[in-house]
Image (spheres, grey):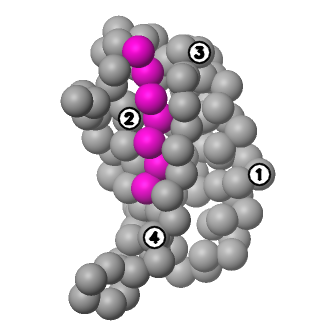
Amino acid sequence: MVKLIAIYKKPEDTGAFDQHYNEVHAPLAAKMPGLIKLEVNRIYGGPMGDSNLHLIAEMYFETKEALTEALSSPEGRAAGKDLMGFAGKLVSMHFAEVE
């Protein structure tokens, strides 16, 4: 199993970010073919206090090929376009193998 991990820094307007993420972006991403699970983690702090992170989203797929196909699908391209429009400067994306 593999996953795509999106790590979001704190936006200036967390309310507007959360509304767009919950009402627009997450539903778009959830339509990606082959997606097994979408897990959203809201960061509330860290061992040293505050964190500069706001959210970590993990999208699980059976194989690397399934992930690649999902990203290149019309649904994946729509989610990517939306992501760059509302969080392009805030997000970093990573691929990981689940052990």
Whole-number angstrom distance, CA of label 4 to CA of label 1: 19 Å
Check contact, mark 3 vs mark 1: CB within 8 A. no
Range covered by the magenta-colored residues: 56-62
Disc 4 or disc 1, which is closer to the eye?
4
Q: CA distance from mark 2 to mark 4?
A: 18 Å
Q: Alpha-carbon neighbours of circle 1 within 10 Å: few (<14), some, or many (≥20)?
A: few
Q: Nearer the viewer, mark 2 or mark 4?
A: 4
Note whether 71 is above or below 95 in the view shown.
Answer: above
Furthest residue in direction right, as rendered: 23
- The main secondary structure of the magenta stretch is strand
Task: Report if the CB atoms under discs 1 and 2 are less than 8 Å apart.
Answer: no
Residue at x 39%, y 80% (from the top left corner): 45
Residue 7 is at least partly visible in this image: yes
Name which quarter of the figure residue 78 lies in: top right
Say which quarter of the image contains residue 7: bottom left
Q: Nearer the viewer, mark 3 or mark 4?
A: 4
